[in-house]
Image (cartoon, rainbow, N blue to C red):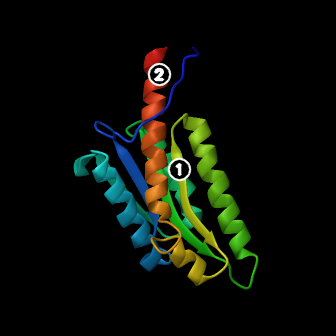
Amino acid sequence: MPRTSEGSQDGAGLNIAIAVSRFTQDLTQRLLDGALEVARDAGIADWAIHVVHVPGAFELPMVAEELAATGSYDAIACLGCVIRGETAHFDYVAGESARGIAEVARRHSLPVTLGVITAENRAQAEARAGGAKTNMGSDAMRAAIEMATLYRSLRHDE
């Protein structure tokens, strides 16, 4: 039988950071609320959760880099919302946000999850901020916890 590894949703003992964009704050607050609910349900104490607010999704990788560099966190969840407008601005912000978040994760060998809504319109964004489709903040936190516990397990197997 091959050896297998996987993470869990037991977040007890984890230190988690959440970077959240203030742009479209009515939606990103819903993402944050969802992430916090998942973290608490997973057994992560409030004192072990550090919420950092940034202006927009473009700034998420910058603050994720600073948080990761401290070595204080088991995972970082990045939350934001980018809604397509009439210019190419959407493409730059959405693309650079996702690329930068992934880059931080690889550089620091740390789970840094992408909870950034990229939507064509407001209705799509609302559906992904706790509406009919999902709450991407909750999803990003579940992924952060699972990956943090997986990393912990892999590092203890060495």
Give the tally of numbered discs.
2
Q: Position of residue 42 (x, y in %)?
A: 32, 46
- Decide if residue 66 is on the left or right side of residue 49: right
Identify the residue at horizontal 54%, vertical 17% (top origin): 3
Q: Earlier in the sequence, mark 2 or mark 1?
A: 1
Q: Nearer the viewer, residue 59 or 15?
A: 15
Identify the residue at horizontal 49%, vertical 54% (top origin): 140
Identify the residue at horizontal 59%, vertical 77% (top origin): 124
Q: Position of residue 31 (x, y in %)?
A: 43, 66
Measure how far apart labels 2 and 1 are at the Cα level: 19 Å
The amino acid beneath tag 1 is Thr
Q: Which residue is mark 1?
A: 113
Q: Which residue is mark 2?
A: 155
Q: Position of residue 89 (x, y in %)?
A: 71, 75
- Decide if residue 13 is on the left or right side of residue 143: left
Residue with the most extreme bottom position: 86
